[in-house]
Image (cartoon, helix red, strand yellow):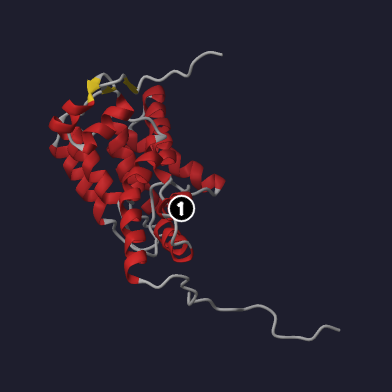
Amino acid sequence: MDPWRTAIVTSDATNIWVRGYEITSLMQRSSFTDTIFLLHRGQLPSEGERRLLDAILIGVADHGAGAPSCAAARLAASGNRQSLSAAIAAGILAIGDEHGGAGSSCMDLIAAGIAASTRDGVSIEDAAQRTVEDAVRMKTRLPGLGHRVHTTDPRTATLFDMAEAEGLAGGGIAFMRALEAEARVRIKPLPLNIDGALAAVLHDIGFPPPFGKLVFIIGRVAGLTAEVAEEYLREQPMRIKIPVTYDGVAPRPID
């Protein structure tokens, strides 16, 4: 049987190397964000790349106890006081395309739009217009736009301003801005949300589309640990008084 292969980490009796760097050197000279970048990209980030990835991780860390991942983690913690990992895992399992997963599909959309712009010799704005027209025709949602709570997602402008200040804003940010403007005309005002913002920034600093979802998971785990810890410390186990409205059949006898 052929051995498993990896280019990420190796070790011997006295050493551990991450992408070729000795782990104790990383511990002394690098940050955790540096290490995330290194693990996924195989190289250490520039100062600007580190700041952007750090900002993204902070931006997705938590959005309140009512967010699906946090609510699921706290509910699992309420019913299972024996396993921290089970509660955290429950929160992670609540992450999907509707919650935290739009970043990767948005990165696919950005890549396709920029490729069409280059291939067909049209502007980014024209490529965004085509994307919106396709969504309207096929009655599909545009990932990265719209938010259930915010009319303006406060994290978006911060990420874009940081990217521009670091000289790292590129086609991804330009495309998402054009997409938001075109959707406002053709559909309705849809704020560019954190998924769309992180997708644009990650595209511009060279990450592949799957990382759009992975970065949300990495950052959200920090928030989940705090949510579960608070549930353990402040709440009684087996919380069952969750607001529920019954709208089914009224009580009735069996014939």
Is 97 situated left or right of 29 in this image?
A: right
Give how far across and how far down residue 193 sits, in percent.
Answer: 33, 51
* Number of marks: 1
Seen at 25% across and 22% down, the residue is 15
Give how far across and how far down residue 104 sits, in percent.
Answer: 41, 39
The answer to whether residue 51 of the structure is visible from this angle is yes
The residue lying toward the viewer, choosing from 98 and 26, is: 26
Within the image, what quadrant is residue 147 found in? Answer: bottom left
Extreme residue toward the front, this view: 13
The answer to whether residue 167 of the structure is visible from this angle is no
Extreme residue toward the top, this view: 2
Identity, as a three-letter code, of the amino acid under mark 1: Ala
Is 167 situated left or right of 227 in this image?
A: left
- Which secondary structure, mark 1? helix
For disc 1, the neighbor class at 10 Å (few under 14, some 14 to 19, many from 20) is some
Is 233 situated left or right of 253 in this image?
A: left
Give how far across and how far down residue 140 sits, in percent.
Answer: 52, 48
Q: Quadrant of the N terminus?
A: top right
Seen at 50% across and 48% down, the residue is 136
Q: Quadrant of the C terminus?
A: bottom right
The residue lying toward the viewer, choosing from 95 and 241, is: 241
Within the image, what quadrant is residue 16 found in? Answer: top left
Residue 157's place in the image compared with 27, above or below, is below
Residue matched to label 1? 86
Extreme residue toward the right, this view: 255
Give how far across and how far down residue 190 sits, in percent.
Answer: 37, 55
Seen at 40% across and 49% down, the residue is 100
